[in-house]
Image: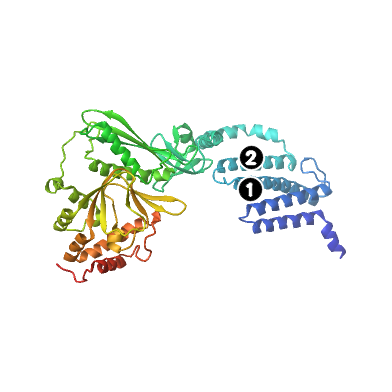
Amino acid sequence: MVSFTHFVQDPIAQFAALVALALIARILARGHSGTRFSANVVFFALLTVLLVSNSVAPWIGDTTAEDLTHHIFIGLAKATWWIGGAMTLVSGVRLFLIFERKPREGRLIQDLLVGLIYSGAALAVIAFVFSLPVGTLIATSGVFAIVLGLALQSTLNDVFSGIALNLGRPYTVGDWIALEDGVQGRVVETNWRATHLLNNTNDLIIVPNSALAKARLTNLTGTDEIHGATITVRLLPTRPPAVVEEAMKTVLLSANCILTSPPPSVSIVGVDSSAIEVELAFKVSNLSRASAARNEIYDLVFRHAKAAGLQLGAPHGAQADAIQSSDGIKHPGTAWRLLNSIALFSTLTEDEMESLAASMKRLTFKKDMVIAPQDASMTSLMIVRSGVVVVEKQTEESCEELTRLAPGDLFGERGVLMGTPETARIRALTFVVVYEISKDHLATVMHDRPSLSDELGQLLAKRMQSEEHLGTGRDKEASGQPTSLAERIRHLFEVPHTLKK
C-alpha cells in the first residue's frame, strides 16, 4: 500500500499517466475537432499544474535536479509542455476555421499559422530545455537559409503570392473567376502553393499562386450570384432597324432561363449595307445557368427571326451568300414549314405532312387574350406561328407563371392525344398567330398509318419528362411511359393495332 501511494505521489509517474491519457484521448477524438481541442486544453492545464506544483517552470532555462533521472524528467516535461501548448493553439486555429465554415478557404493561412506555432515551440524547446542560445543559432543559420531560399525560389514565390492574395481577397472560395488567357472556373481551394479552379466541364485547373498574382483576373461572381451576359446577333438589313429591335425584344420576352428583373435590353450597335448588328443583354440567377440561357436565346433568335421574315447575316468580313431553302421552294406554305420544324411530326411522310398542312387554320389572338382557360379540354393542336404565349397556373391566392412558348412550340397536345384537360391557363403575352390542327384531321392520318401512335407516344413521353420540372401537374400514370401513352392514343383515336403498309 505504501509503495502504491508513493507511486501515485511521484511526479514522474503522474507525468507518464497524464501523457498516456492524452494519447488515448487524441485517438478517441480523431475526426472531432471540438473534442480534440477540449482534450488538448485539459491536458495542457493539468500539465501546467503538475509542473508548477513541483517547482518546475517551463519558461526558465536554468534548472537543477537531484539526479540524472529527475533532470531527464524535467527536460522531457518542459518539451512536452511547449509541444502541448503548440498543439492546443493549432487545434484552436483549426476549430475556429471550421466554426467560420471556411476550412478550405483558410488552408493557406491555417498552414502558415501552424508552421509559425510549431517553429516557435521548437525554438522554445531549444532555448529552455537544451539551454542553447537561440539568437546565435538563428544568426549562424543565415547562410543555410539563403541557400535554401535560392533553391526554393519558385515555391517561396507561390507561398508569398498566396499570402498577398489572401490578404487582398480579390476572390473567395465559391467565386467564379476568369483569367486573361481565357481560363475560368469556380474557386474550390486556395492552399500554400496554388489555387484550384473547377471549370464548366468539371475539370480541376491548378493555377500557381505566383501566376495568379501577376495575371489580370475578373471576378464573375461580384457581390451576389446574379450574372449578366450579352449576345450579339447580325441580321440582314431587309427590314428597318426598329422592326429588328422589336423582334429581338420578343426573343427576350419568350425566354424562360433569364431573369425578368432587372429587365433585359436590346441595343442596335451597328448598321451597314451587309447587316444590322444587335446586342441582347440579360441576367441569370447564377453563373452556372449562363450557358443554358445563351443556348435558349440563340434558339429563340433563330425561331423569331424566321417568324418575322428576318434572315441571319454573315460574320464580319465574310462574304454574304444568298441562301434559299429548297424546302421553301417546294413547300412555300407557312403551315408546312411549321409542321416540318416540330419534332413531334418529324415521323410523318411528306404526303401526310401536306395533308395536315392543307387542313390547318390560321388564328390570331390579341395581347393578354386567353387562348385556353385552365381545366379546359382542347380538341385541337395549336402551333405558335409568331408572338409569345405564357402558360400560368391559377390558384385562389396567386397566378404562377410556368413557362413561355415561342414560334414553333405547340400546346393542346394533352387534350388531343390523351383526352385530359389543361392544368394551366394559356394566354397571349403579345399579339400571337397560331395554326390549328383539328383532332379529326390528325385522326385521319393516324388511321392511315397506325404506327404513328407509337411514334407520337414516344415523342410525347420525352416531351412530358422534359417538362416535369415546370410543375404543370401532368398525369403521373402516363408521364414517362411511352407504351401507356401509345395505348391511350390508340384508344382515343380508335386506331387498330395491326400495322398497315
The residue positioned 77% from the left and 54% from the top of the image is 15
Report x, y in % for residue 183: 40, 39
The residue positioned 26% from the left and 31% from the top of the image is 241
Quadrant of the rendering where the C terminus is positioned? bottom left
Q: Is residue 321 above or below residue 35?
A: above
Q: From mark 1 to mark 2, how far is it between C-alphas? A: 17 Å
Nearest the camera: 200 or 323? 323
The numbered mark, 1 or 2, whose residue comes first in the sequence reads 1
In the rendered image, which residue does mark 1 sit on? 95
Identify the element where label 1 is drawn: helix
Report x, y in % for residue 435: 23, 51
Q: Residues within 10 Å of mark 2 (few under 14, many from 20)?
A: some
The residue positioned 26% from the left and 69% from the top of the image is 491
Q: Residues within 10 Å of mark 1 (few under 14, many from 20)?
A: some
Eye-nearest disc, 1 or 2: 1
Report x, y in % for residue 345: 22, 56
Q: Is residue 150 above or below residue 289?
A: above
Nearest the camera: 402 or 396? 396
As drawn, the residue found furthest toward the right would be: 2
Q: Is residue 431 above or below residue 15?
A: above
Q: Give the amino acid type for the residue marked by disc 2 in the picture.
A: Leu
Nearest the camera: 313 or 76? 313
Residue 11 appearing in the image: yes
State left or right for residue 281 relative to residue 208.
Answer: left
Identify the element where label 2 is drawn: helix
Find out whether the residues at labels 1 and 2 contact each other: C-beta distance under 8 Å.
no
Quadrant of the rendering where the N terminus is positioned? bottom right
Q: Give the amino acid type for the residue marked by disc 1 in the picture.
A: Leu
- Tell me how the rendering is colored: rainbow
Residue 71 appearing in the image: no
Report x, y in % for residue 365: 28, 46
In the rendered image, which residue does mark 2 sit on? 116
